[in-house]
Image (cartoon, rainbow, N blue to C red):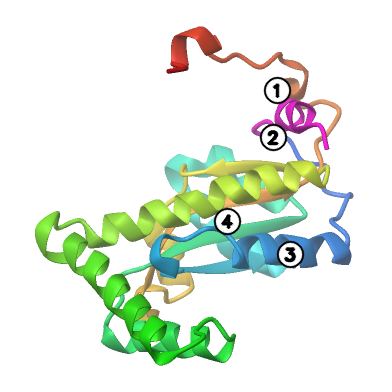
Amino acid sequence: MDLKSILNFRYSTKEFDPIKKISKDHIEQIKALLQMSPSSINLQPWHFIIAHTKEGKERVAKGTEGFFQFNKPKITDASHVIVFTSRIDADENYMQHLLDQEEKDGRFPNDEIKESVNSARNLFANIHRYDTKDFQHWMEKQVYLNMGNLLLGVAALGIDAVPMEGVDLKAIDEEFSLREKGFTSLAVVSLGYRKDSDFNAKAPKSRLPQEEILSLV
């Protein structure tokens, strides 16, 4: 795998071909990307809404009414659209749920390690709850890590994407009753295949030079 080629293939797609659809095999791989993303203390503080029908994409596009209407075609013309959401909290019941799943998956060779993992997870969670007081923001950071993982992964599959914060998150929360379910939306990522007319596909990438951003010590 030539990672540089994948990085140069990836860009923020401005126009999607509404005819081209992502294959079922690639969708399964995309689901795995979302599920298996790195997560601090394995907190996995996310839920994803994957819209693939016309009706589903129209529901997501309610977040582009008004000021953000310029982003609507990026949703309605895409093959699939993913709403990235973050947990609002991770209470004791959720922490136990994680522990139970890890035990079910065979993560613990003995009870001592199980208790050590549980204590460490709650320790770090409480640092963010009570010391740095940024618990929800910390969870949101992990969702963004997942988004970056997705963008590189789909590029490796030859799939185009565009991440968008230019949406009405409150409207999306209301459309999918997210807050009542303990989540809030953060961004939308549209997936599909670029149109030949997409100007951004032809533009060279622009990044600060490595000697400016890297220090080898």
What residue would you read off at disc 3? 54
Q: Position of residue 178 (x, y in %)?
A: 41, 73
Reading the image, the residue beneath label 1 is 200
Q: Which residue matches tag 4?
A: 61
Of tags 1 and 4, the one toward the viewer is 1
> Can residue 73 be seen in this snapshot?
no
**What whole-number distance in Å separates the C-alpha atoms at marks 1 and 3?**
25 Å
Q: Disc 1 vs disc 2: Cβ atoms closer than 8 Å? A: yes
Given residues 213 and 22, the one toward you in this image is 213
Name the amino acid, label 1: Asn
Element marked by disc 4: helix
Q: Which residue is mark 2?
A: 13
Magenta span of residues: 1-13
Left or right of 47, for residue 41:
left
Q: Is residue 71 above or below residue 87?
A: above
Measure the C-alpha gap from mark 4 to mark 3: 10 Å
Please tell me whether mark 3 or mark 2 is closer to you in this view. Answer: 2
Judge by depth and name the residue closer to the eye, 107 or 192: 107
Q: What's the residue type where badge 3 is placed?
A: Lys
Q: In which quadrant of the rendered view does residue 34 lie?
A: bottom right
The mark closer to the camera, 4 or 2, is 2
Q: Residues within 10 Å of mark 2 (few under 14, many from 20)?
A: many
Q: Position of residue 103 (x, y in %)?
A: 50, 89
Question: Marks 4 and 2, how far apart in space?
Answer: 17 Å
Name the residue type under label 2.
Thr
Q: Tag on residue 72?
A: none
